[in-house]
Amino acid sequence: MNLSERLRSAEGTQSPAGTPAPAPVQPPARQETAAAPASGVEPRIHATTLPPAFPQPTDTHRAKNQQPIDAFAALKHRAATALFERMGTRFNDSAVKEDELRTSAREELIRIIDAEQVPLSSEERSRLVQDVADDVLGYGPLQRLLDDPAVTEIMVNCMDQIYVERNGKLTLTESRFSSEDHLRKVIERIVSKVGRRIDESSPLVDARLEDGSRVNAVIPPLAVGGSSLTIRKFSKVPLTVRNLIEFGTLTPEMAELLNACVKAKLNIIVSGGTGTGKTTLLNVLSSFLPDDERIVTIEDAVELQIQQRHVVRLESRPPNTEGKGEVTIRELLRNSLRMRPDRIVVGEVRGGESLDMLQAMNTGHDGSLSTVHSNSPRDAVARLETLVLMAGMDLPLRAIREQIASAVNLIVQISRLRDGSRRITHVTEVQGMEGDIVTLQDAFVFDYSAGVDAHGRFLGKPVPTGIRPRFIDRFEDLGIYVSPGVFAAPLTAAGRV
């Protein structure tokens, strides 16, 4: 007798006291027409609309296939309800440690399942305990994906469609929520832990998990097909420069140069598209910061994993239900100037705060770091110009470009290539102004000419252009040594590149 039959037998013969057995599932009515509704939305394909080559499932088959799912779901629901009744007060007790709570909950779940007297194999029992524990203590069907180190991003399109990113590739998982209400409860559980809210008056929110993973949620009416949830996971152990070298993101020579640039207090902008790894690279650059300097970080949602001890972390705040109390990145950046920072690290500039950041870089706060969305170093300069104009100041374009040329010393461009890997494609020096143009000079560029291997993975790596940046003189003044071979262009069949 399989699990389905055992569950149906147990449901029909016994159930816990006071808990009625679930009603039998009625087969859905057959649809005789596939005409589109007046709204123009395409109807779901019903069994009768399948091509003749496909066997038409009967109502009996449909009911037979759906019954085990409902029976197992009912068993999970009863176990979760009983667990809440027995441990409800402990779930809200802040004095109880998370590990102790999970251990106690699992032990109680085992007793509850034993009391059900449903014949289950050890594998089925473990699955039931895990599912209920995830629903009660974790984030439901997302918990296993969050625990999987190979998953870097989770995308919930609707309650029954969950995609993940593994090794830079998107795949559809078998995980799903039992209902839209179940998905909403998980979203509310996430956002409430960081003091955010999500409802019809505020139907989208940015939040984070305990490990710093970035969360974005959108609910109806903005999300037409059902609530949407996106989680960008961050490694529990911060990635180091050695990890990025092993991944091929950068080379040892490039790492030596970036280390020297951070120690020489050059102002650095990390540029890249969405999901290219800008925050990860910013974390690695911040690991080069000296331990004896005061660091102030400013972010929309705290994501940076700064390893130094002398760090002040600031986070913006959205408006409350009355539309008041908002604290923006720009206000935090202005306030940070009064906090005696040696370094200012802005998670990302996406508005008028870029003007304040450039002014801070130009007024003695050297060595600042930030990120910006753009597809190339030249685009990064244009993007900064646009963001400065968003500050509401009627500044001439030449004045803005002079600010950028004076403030920014280095642009590091990171991209996600079509093989899914993240690579630094440019390390570019901002040299100054020539007429009305900000002049840029590449120190490293990615070598696309190396081609791809049999698996479609790029064989190239970032290589030096052979041009010595102007800021090397600053290294010499500060006593910072950089190997001469860092800027040596690689040899090719025709000579140097």
Image: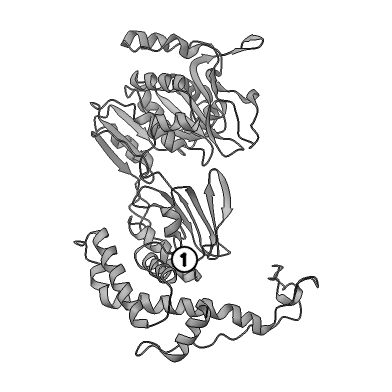
Foreground residue among 378 and 157:
157
Q: Give the residue type at disc 1.
A: Leu
- Residue labelled with disc 1: 183
Say if 479 sits above or below 424 in the image.
Answer: above
The answer to which quarter of the image holds residue 284 is top left
Foreground residue among 354 and 37:
37
Q: Position of residue 373 (x, y in %)?
A: 51, 36
Per the image, label 1 sits on a secondary structure element best described as helix
Crowd rating for badge 1 (residues with CA inside 10 Å; few <14, some 14–19, many 20+): many
Q: Position of residue 479 (x, y in %)?
A: 31, 10
Asked whether residue 328 appears in the rendered view, the answer is: yes
Q: Position of residue 173 (x, y in %)?
A: 55, 58
> Quick check: 393 left or right of 493?
left
Residue drawn at x 45%, y 69% as measured from the top left: 182
The answer to which quarter of the image holds residue 339 is top left
Q: Position of residue 170 (x, y in %)?
A: 57, 49
